[in-house]
Amino acid sequence: MSDRPSLDAYFMHIARVVASRSTCLHRHVGAVIVKGKQIVSTGYNGAPAGQPHCLDIGCAREGVPSGQRSELCRGAHAEQNAINFAARFGISIEGATLYTTHFPCSWCAKSIVNAGIRRVVYAEDYPDPLAKAILAGLDVVQAPEGD
C-alpha cells in the first residue's frame, strides 16, 4: 500500500501552507486553484497590496463575532486573492477546483460562481448559510480530517 496522498489531500496540504502567509489576526486562510491537476493560482487572506497589515495596525473587526460584518474587514479573503491573481495574469480558471482551508463566505462564494469554478474542497466549516446556498449548484466537499 502506498503512502502517496490523494490529489485532494495533496492540494489541501498546499492550501494550509499558503494560509501560513496570512496577516489576519483571527483566521489564517489559504486557497489554491487547480486546473488539470496543476496549480494555477494561490491566495491567502490579508490587506490589499501596499496597505498596512492587520498584524501591524490591529483588526478593524475586533469584538465582532465570526461571520458577521465582513464589510468592516480591511483584508481581502484568500479565495478573492486567488481569483484576482488569476484574472490579473490572464489565467483561465473556468471549470477549476478551489481548495480552501475554510468554507468560503458569501462574498467569496459569489466570486467563485462567477469565475466559473466548478468544485470546492474545504477543510473547516464557516458560519455563513447564504454561502452554502450560493454554492449549492457546485460540487462542494469537505476534506476528510487529516487530509
Image (cartoon, helix red, strand yellow):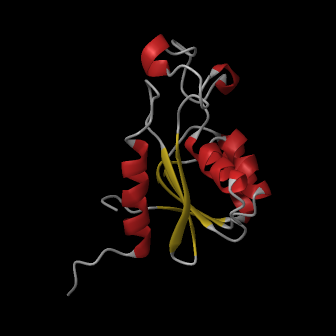
Which of the 4 quarters of the picture holds residue 33? bottom right
Is residue 133 visible in this depiction of the protein? no
Which quadrant is home to the N terminus? bottom left
Q: Vertically, is 85 above or below 99? A: above
Q: What residue appears at the point 62 percent right and 23 percent down from the top-left corner?
A: 73
Q: Vertically, is 120 above or below 84? A: below
Q: Give the residue at the far right of this rendering.
A: 114
Is residue 109 visible in this depiction of the protein? yes
Relative image position of residue 21 (x, y in whole percent) = 41, 39
* 118 vs 134, nearest the viewer: 118
Q: Vertically, is 115 above or below 76? A: below
Q: What residue appears at the point 56 percent right and 43 percent down from the top-left corner?
A: 78
* 89 vs 41, nearest the viewer: 89
Relative image position of residue 74 (x, y in whole percent) = 62, 23
Q: Vertically, is 21 above or below 4? A: above
Relative image position of residue 110 (x, y in whole percent) = 75, 48
* 145 vs 2, nearest the viewer: 2
